[in-house]
Image: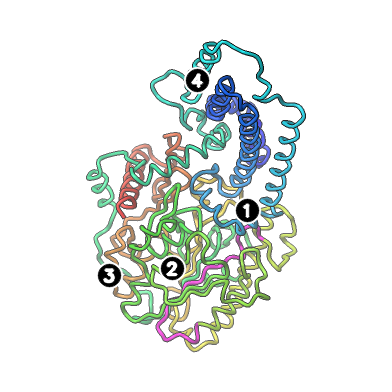
């Protein structure tokens, strides 16, 4: 219950927007999970207590119990504080997917502004010290058990306690065992997440992550029925516009870290945060209804490069056995003579990205290791200005045509950049985010000024988009469709002049890039079975996105977000008949992709 209070305090931005009485109610609805967790944690102490009546080695048992309690307290404190901080940024409880990043401690230490993770470790160490002192001075242990007791008494008590613990763990005597849904009581996901016991949820998530590698947790219908539904959403290729002036233009794919439509003025966002990109939109073809498929960089890259829809609790990049069989844009382009390269100013090993890039067919990978130590000026590696200098120097050396992907990082948390726009001087997250995006936009503009002077520019196409959206600056909820709306711009010397300054309103998302781009180049995209050419005249517009444990679907006439945890719609916009159809289609989409993921 104390952990729930900590969660509310750490996420007061969201907690303050709901009725206080509902926050109090979350303690009641989460009580069963609290009891279940306490029962799990009491099993070992109960066994030790029972054994203490049948052995003379009580001192040893007492040391085991003390160590268990101190370690347990420390772990729970760590999980509670880490969960509260994670939720601020990702809008999800600490789970198997989030905990997989623990193998990158350096990156985790700089994830939050103010070195939160370092403070967390210090707090945990403080609790360890305090708990040890309490046990040393004031707590009685198993070695205090004295005198002879009839053997049947502790045995009887032990059996009774085990039965009580079993019922507590299970959540009662009902037919169904307790699960996270037992704490759900509201259409407001934040309230439900507040009610969930954090430690219980993490434990269950780790078990589910293992089980979900064997079976499909998103089975709503027969697979054949789901396939028919998905087939009905796909268009048969007909004709589409020709955007490029060349059959084999150089292509630079710019993946911007966490840029959301909310800071792009031509997309209806705030003014002057991205003045260069705003101006560049007038010299390119802008798509103003474009969506990210997921909420993290690793998910975004798989969607952009390999047309893989995002997974809720995992990323296909995390599994080497699965990503090595994926199709990719670089592989397709190499077949017609393209040189391929990837530029990133951070550690490419993070989130298994380097392995994925190499398996995707990139000839050259330029990452943090390719920058001099005195250039390492950002928590994640090098800032975007340094990165763009390296990109500019490398492009002139490549044989044309080339396909180069650039992943930026200056606008990543903790938003510390060597730039201070006087309009965004606040130390709050929204202003820190705006300032970092403003800096990233400035460096992008400086690169373009120099790029236009290069001989290769006239035959070069720039495809500019974001890896995912962001909660800031509007503090959008994790499942808000607008949080997934991102910029998508095609520009450069190889773009036909008739399309410059135009805006296309078609709804599409990251997985559709491969089919659209390859079709323009006259290359088959059949192996990208989740990708659709959104410039095709027969294209049926829709976009999907996945968050924590739910899926969203956007169509011109309706928007739906279905939450898998609570088994309910949490956003419904449009006619009820259309929404019913949208729910069926979204479920079929999620089911079939996960089934394909399992088979890889």
Residue assigned mark 3: 524
Of 577 and 223, the residue lying toward us: 223
Residue assigned mark 1: 473
Mark 3, secondary structure of its residue: loop
Cα separation between marks 1 and 3: 40 Å
Vertical order, 345 against 595 (above or below) = below
Residue assigned mark 2: 357
Closer to the observer: label 4 or label 3? 4
Of 600 and 508, the residue lying toward us: 600
Q: Residues within 10 Å of mark 4 (few under 14, many from 20)?
A: some
Looking at marks 2 and 3 on the same chain, the residue that comes earlier in the sequence is marked by 2
Q: How many marks?
A: 4
Cα separation between marks 2 and 4: 52 Å
Q: Circles 1 and 4: CB distance less than 8 Å? A: no
Looking at marks 1 and 3 on the same chain, the residue that comes earlier in the sequence is marked by 1
Residue drawn where x is 45% and y is 63% of the image: 287
Cα separation between marks 4 and 3: 63 Å
Vertical order, 264 against 68 (above or below) = below
Looking at marks 2 and 1 on the same chain, the residue that comes earlier in the sequence is marked by 2
Closer to the observer: label 1 or label 4? 4
Looking at marks 1 and 4 on the same chain, the residue that comes earlier in the sequence is marked by 4
Name the dominant secondary structure of the magenta segment: loop
Residue 187: x percent and y percent? 50, 33
Quarter of the N terminus within the rendering: top right
The residue positioned farthest toward the right in the image shown: 137
Mark 2, secondary structure of its residue: helix
Closer to the observer: label 2 or label 1? 2
Magenta region, residue range: 395-415
Of 38 and 332, the residue lying toward us: 38
């Amino acid at each position: 219950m104390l952990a729930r209070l900590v969660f509310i305090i750490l996420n007061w931005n969201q907690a303050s927007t709901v009725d206080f009485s509902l926050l109090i109610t979350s303690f009641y609805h989460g009580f069963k999970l609290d009891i279940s967790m306490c029962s799990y944690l009491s099993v070992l102490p109960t066994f030790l207590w029972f054994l203490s009546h049948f052995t003379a080695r009580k001192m040893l048992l007492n040391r085991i119990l003390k160590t268990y309690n101190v370690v347990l307290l420390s772990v729970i404190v760590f999980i509670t504080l880490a969960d509260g901080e994670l939720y601020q940024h990702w809008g999800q409880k600490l789970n198997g997917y989030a905990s997989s990043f623990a193998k990158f401690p350096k990156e985790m230490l700089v994830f939050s502004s103010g070195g939160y993770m370092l403070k967390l470790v210090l707090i945990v160490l403080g609790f360890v010290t305090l708990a040890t002192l309490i046990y040393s001075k004031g707590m009685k242990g198993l070695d205090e058990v004295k005198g002879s007791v009839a053997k049947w008494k502790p045995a009887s008590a032990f059996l009774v306690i085990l039965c009580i613990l079993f019922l507590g763990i299970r959540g009662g005597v009902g037919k169904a065992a307790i699960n996270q849904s037992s704490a759900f009581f509201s259409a407001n996901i934040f309230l439900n997440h507040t009610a969930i016991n954090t430690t219980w949820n993490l434990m269950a998530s780790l078990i589910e992550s293992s089980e979900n590698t064997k079976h499909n947790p998103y089975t709503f219908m027969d697979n054949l029925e789901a396939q028919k539904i998905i087939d009905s959403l796909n268009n048969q290729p007909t004709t589409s516009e020709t955007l490029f002036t060349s059959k084999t233009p150089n292509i630079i794919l710019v993946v911007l870290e966490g840029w959301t439509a909310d800071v792009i003025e031509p997309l209806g966002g705030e003014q002057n945060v991205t003045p260069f990109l705003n101006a560049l939109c007038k010299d390119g073809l802008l798509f103003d209804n474009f969506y990210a498929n997921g909420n993290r960089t690793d998910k975004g890259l798989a969607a952009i490069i390999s047309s893989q829809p995002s997974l809720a609790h995992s990323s296909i990049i995390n599994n080497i056995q699965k990503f090595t069989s994926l199709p990719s844009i670089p592989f397709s382009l190499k077949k017609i003579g393209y040189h391929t390269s990837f530029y990133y100013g951070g550690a490419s090993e993070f989130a298994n990205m380097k392995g994925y890039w190499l398996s995707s067919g990139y000839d050259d990978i330029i990452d943090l290791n390719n920058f001099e130590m005195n250039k390492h000026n950002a928590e994640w590696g090098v800032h975007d200005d340094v990165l763009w200098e390296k990109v500019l120097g490398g492009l002139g050396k490549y044989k044309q045509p080339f396909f180069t992907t650039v992943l930026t990082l200056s606008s990543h948390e903790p938003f510390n950049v060597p730039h201070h726009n006087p309009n965004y001087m606040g130390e709050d997250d929204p202003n820190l985010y705006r300032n970092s995006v403003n800096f990233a936009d400035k460096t992008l503009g400086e690169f373009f000024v120099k790029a236009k002077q290069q001989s290769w520019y006239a035959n070069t196409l720039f495809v500019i988009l974001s890896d995912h959206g962001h909660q800031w600056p509007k503090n959008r909820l994790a499942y808000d469709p607008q949080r997934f709306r991102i910029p998508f711009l095609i520009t450069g010397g190889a773009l036909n002049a008739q399309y410059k300054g135009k805006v296309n309103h078609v709804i599409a998302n990251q997985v559709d890039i491969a089919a659209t781009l390859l079709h323009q180049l006259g290359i088959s995209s059949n192996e990208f079975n989740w990708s659709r050419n959104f410039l095709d005249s027969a294209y049926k517009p829709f976009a999907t996105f996945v968050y924590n444990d739910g899926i969203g679907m956007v169509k011109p006439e309706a928007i739906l977000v279905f939450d898998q945890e609570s088994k309910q719609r949490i956003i419904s916009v449009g006619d009820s008949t259309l929404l019913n159809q949208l729910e069926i289609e979204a479920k079929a989409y999620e089911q079939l992709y996960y089934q394909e993921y399992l088979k890889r």
